[in-house]
Image (cartoon, helix red, strand yellow):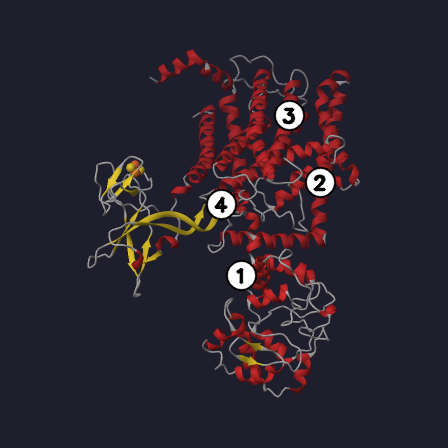
Amino acid sequence: MRKLIADWFEDRAGLGSRLRSMREEHLPAGPRWGYVCGSALLAVLLVQAFTGLMMMTAYSPGTPTAWGSVFFIEKQMWMGWLVRGLHHFGAQTVMVLAAVHLLQVLFAGAYRAPRELNWWLGLVLLGLLVGFGHTGYQLPWDQKGFWATKVSTNIAGGAPVLGPYVKTVVVGGVDYGNQTLTRFYGMHVGILPVLLTITLAAHLALRYRHGLKPPEGAPTEPPPGGWTATYFPDQTFRNSLVVVAIVGLLFGLVFWHGGAPLDAPADPSSPDYPARPEWYFRFLYQMLKYFPGHLEWVGSIVVPGALMTTLALLPLLDKVIPSRALHFLACAGAFAVVGGATFLTIQSFVEDARSESFQAARKKADAENARALFLASHPDFGVPPEGSNYLFRHDPLTRGAALMEKKCLSCHVMGGKGPEGDENAQAGSDLKGFGSLAWIRGLLENPGSDAYFGTSPENDGMVEWKKTTKLTAEQLDQVAEFVAGFAAIGEDQTVDDWLNTEGVADHPGYDPFVKDCGKCHYVGGAASEITEGGDRDAPDLFAWGSPRWFRRMVRQPSHDSLYGFLEADQRMPASPPDEMSDHDVSMIYRYLRGDYLK
Amino acid sequence: MNRRDFHRLGTWALGGLVKLAVAVPAVAFLLNPLRKKDGTPAAEAFEALVPLSELKVGEPRSFGIVRDQVDAWVKYPREPVGSVWLIRQPEGVEPRVVALNAECPHLGCAVGRSADGEGFYCPCHSSAFDAEGKPMNRIPPRPMDALEVELSQDADPIVSVKFERFRPLATEKIPLA
Ligand code: FES
């Protein structure tokens, strides 16, 4: 029965005999380790295609969704980390094997007639593989991919004449966005695979036409009794051994790293992301440092282009220049290039390891990376519907701190430190722990310290009060506790509502507050006046330290009920809503109050 | 076994090993949706819908169910997930309110009220149900899915429903995980 079906197919397709002739290819010099490289490359390419197809069922190109879907693959899907990890490290393996394959063919002189065509096809394949690596790198839309791709496409855009147009077409516009992702995705999973399949099919067909290049001195006539070694199973056994070793190494890498890396979501506004290309492009990256900016394209396009052209011309030069001399030159050149690339790669990594600013930027990026993954996987947070770029905008720890840095820390300090932990010309209070019991108690203890009003000496009401007050330490504790409770006053609560809630009028801090603080600070509503104030100018303390008070302080710091009494140049500048949204104000507030996921 | 046999066996075995190593994670990857999700607390919760006094006896009213949804990687706050019919029962009958999932037990269309106002009718393949959700023809595989109802202790109790969905076409109520 089996024979019947096989014959039927053989009759119609002739597949069996063709396969058989491949399997029974004779190996005059026996199986060789030197022949495995192409097969190993093919095997890893198949792994890539397979894992890639799997991920296509889960990936979603588009700036709001790409990162989230990759996060989902990597962190939540069953064995997603393994599938993506194999694809990630497989891509690097492909690059290494392709380079080894190229060198091996070069050293063997297999670019010579009659294999010229296949040599060229091989070079085309190399270009396609680089295209795969390049387009795939940015699909996760994470910081790493985003910045690396931005840099490399800008390099292309720096080429004379056509450069800017090429870049705009590739990127899908002037800016990087949805079109960049859909285009790169289409290239990565559609256009390039088709081109690769066609080229690879031709490459393999020619390889069978010419056979494997036998080593020098191999017998050309079959020995008596016929050839003993055939491609299957003698060569395939070696191929399989090597493929098992390589795939084993791949699995090892994936397990060791626990999957593939995923950086924080792409943020075009991040000021100091240390962009680096994948390690196999490092030599190019490093080489660029030796070119002045406007000649960047020489390093990035002309040099690699010239290299590829030389390689492509080898079979033709072989006809003009004595074969042996050319081969020697080519091999020497290859050694020089490999040596140079290795040197540049090492130099690049060493430079980074020694550079403090790189390390600092990398550390910051790593912290953001960890925070992003933490938020995305937290059941109370998750990737917001607006997209992964909004992940941090809803996180007080990240967004609040960044806004503080930009808006507040030119005058205020956090724990004595200005922006990026540097000094600033402090002209405001220390906001670390603002509104907390400890902060208030500290103010009542030493209002003139730098942490409070020390750096705004015109604002000296509290300092004067401290000189004359008779409150005991215990009473100060109670007042601090009482005032710390103001932060809980709700958005719609009036003074009268608040007074009638439990624990307000009968709080032990109430009386000392009214008697001492109330001399200057006014707290009152429609029906009742708790304190009269007025001895000296001072802000209204109702709901002090609550979100509503804080928002007012940001919007109208010069209002009569706040710090309007100060001279114009001593007041805090206001931030209107078009400069800072209510959402952003609440991010700062929650950051200061420590109200975020930990 | 000679050398060539060994090579033949080795090729098959090693080749099989590599294919298996890649196939296993791939299959798991594709079967991911079958995996039980751990702890979806929202599914356990009762949804407060309406005060009892606003329901008229014997007159079904439909209510949308809105809850936090996790759709693969995205967390949507307050998304509509389905709707229920609430039918207040005459005084003295227990339970005081019947809640029916509006999802048709046949193939999942939305069940509306029948033209005569007596019961329910699904426009997709004409499943008909009576006022209690029992099938009136042979198209639906089971009655409309009754949901657990809770009434609060207030003078005018709030009606809450535990919203659950069940497998279509099954003759039993099998909850969708
Ligand atoms: S889905 Fe309701 S009748 Fe078929």
Residue B166 is tagged as none
Do the CB atoms of the residues marked 4 and 1 lie less than 8 Å apart? no
The chain holding disc 2 is A
Name which residue lies at 56% across and 66% down. Answer: A548
| Whole-number angstrom distance, CA of label 2 to CA of label 3 | 22 Å
Looking at the picture, does residue A329 appear above or below residue A491? above
Q: Amino acid at mark 1?
A: Tyr
Do the CB atoms of the residues marked 2 and 3 lie less than 8 Å apart? no
The chain holding disc 4 is A
Task: Classify mark 3: helix, strand or loop.
Answer: helix
**Do marks 2 and 3 share a subunit?**
yes
Q: Is mark 1 within 8 Å of ligand 1?
A: no
Q: Amino acid at mark 2?
A: Tyr
**Do marks 4 and 2 share a subunit?**
yes
Do the CB atoms of the residues marked 4 and 3 lie less than 8 Å apart? no
Q: Is mark 2 within 8 Å of ligand 1?
A: no
Residue at which label 1 appears? A596
Residue at which label 2 appears? A285
Residue at which label 4 appears? A72
Please state the total of marks drawn on the protein image.
Answer: 4
Do the CB atoms of the residues marked 4 and 2 lie less than 8 Å apart? no
Q: Nearer the viewer, mark 4 or mark 3?
A: 4
**Do marks 4 and 1 share a subunit?**
yes
Q: Is mark 4 within 8 Å of ligand 1?
A: no
Residue A348 place in picture, x, y as percent: 71, 44
Residue pushed farthest bottom?
Answer: A470
Mark 2 or mark 3: name the one nearer the start of the chain.
3
| Whole-number angstrom distance, CA of label 4 to CA of label 2 | 31 Å
Q: Amino acid at mark 3?
A: Val
